[in-house]
Amino acid sequence: AIKSITATQRLDSRGNPTVQTRIVTSNGTFTSLVPSGASKGDYEAVELRDGDDSIYHGNSVLKAVRNVNEILGPAVCKAGLDPATELKRLDQLMIKLDGSNDKGNLGANAILSISMALARAGAAARNIPLYEYIAAEAGLPTDNYVLPVPFFNVLNGGDHSGNSMAFQEFMIAPVGASSTSEAVQFAAETYASLKSVIVAKSGKSAIGIGDEGGFAPPIYHPCEALELLTQAIEDAGHTGKICIGIDPASQSFFEHGSYNIGFKTETPESLQPSELAQMYRSLMDSYPIILLEDPFGQDDWQSFVEFNKDCPIELVGDDLLATNITRIKMAKDKGACNSLLLKINQIGTISEAIAAAKEAYAAEWSVFVSHRSGETTDDFIADLTVGLRTGHLKSGAPCRGERVAKYNRLMDIEDELGDRQLPFKYAGPNLRHAQKL
Ligand code: PGA
Ligand code: ZN
């Protein structure tokens, strides 16, 4: 049984306050810390911030903390439901208490922090690892697993860094590794090579990093980023084994119907949607790009649909879908993309995140699990990725504790599956169809 649920205010990786929740049951104490985005979409569940300019520049989350301590926590304790088997009902109870469509009354940060800790408490009550609990909740296999290809965001732009590059993320994906641990090794080696390439090109002052641990050198055009990556991959000796994913997060530079890739400079450079699409296609012709996320703005359905026709690569909806089943169904009907970006704080409960993944699988889409740019040391999404069999996730560079926490947990899971003598496979090049492996 649940004995107590309490929350406090802690910091995330940008130094902003976030919610930490602690649940005590007869099996122990279970905590969670919630992440926070910078390039947030309009369709995300609402993160409650106090807006009191006298502390933390308005970013404190004391209301959300109070909502856990005084409203959500007591109600969840009193409900007498068992997190071992009734996560969905517990999440539904919180959704009902909030009463809004976007969790804006009590706060998605408050609700998610409880949902995450409940899942951990439920797993402990059943004496199983969190990834197995999630697989069981999702109705996926619990006797064999798929380990993901990690996508490492090694060059940061957009709203995540101070350089003038509009595109937010350039990720390296070691699909040619033989395991997640080897993928981590390939990525860390390439990251170190990238540092040398940047120093050689722009000097030591250029190796500062962005919010997700990737370098943020003084570059502007996506081609410059891809050239740096190509050189680093080659220097590290991994050519042919590492593919590339790009998240332009184009909502950040969508202005009045066109895309201003000069938005971080003094000189606007506006591209029509068709010109931007052409730029993506020519990049795809020249570099080993296997994934493109949010190439267009969250309401630019027409451009998404057009690009998705005969799209040879994974086309991921992030701001477009906001991990929201209604938006996923809309996108499915229109044929707007072929993959769901899964961010737990976009929707605000674990059971809804699982339902969103299943909705995507039902449409024959892939699922790509994601951290936020404001993260914490909480490694929940590593277990979520393995449990949901998504075959890939992104958690930033192989650098900064809050990013590395997830990769380290994945390697722990890989070791643990070996110890448990459970069969598992590395998703590798099959990452888009991992749930069928
Ligand atoms: P965010 O960025 O966490 O700042 O929203 C991540 C992304 O766009 O995928
Ligand atoms: Zn994104």
Image: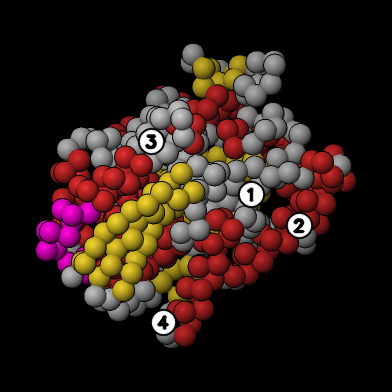
Residue of label 3: 49
Is residue 174 rendered to the left or right of residue 333? Answer: right
Q: Amino acid at mark 1?
A: Gly
Quarter of the image for residue 33 reads bottom left
Q: Measuring 37% from the left and 52% from the top, which residue is drawn there?
A: 8
Q: Which mark is residue 161?
A: none
Of the two numbered discs 4 and 1 in the rendering, the one whose residue sits closer to the viewer: 1
Foreground: disc 4 or disc 2 = 2
Instruction: Decide which of tag 2 and tag 3 comes sooner along the chain.
Output: 3
| Marker disc for residue 192 | 2
Q: Find the magenta span and give its range.
A: 73-84
Q: Earlier in the sequence, mark 3 or mark 4?
A: 3
Mark 1 secondary-structure assignment: loop
Pointer 4 or 1: first along the chain: 1
> What kind of residue is marked 2?
Ala
Q: Are marks 2 and 3 in contact (CB under 8 Å)?
A: no
Quadrant housing residue 170: top right
Residue 213, numbered label: 1
First-in-chain label (1 vs 2): 2
Q: Residue at x 59, y 37 (%)?
A: 160
Tags 4 and 1 in contact by the CB under 8 Å rule?
no
Quick one: label 1, few (<14), some, or many (20+) residues within 10 Å?
many
Q: Which residue lies under the disc numbered 4? A: 422
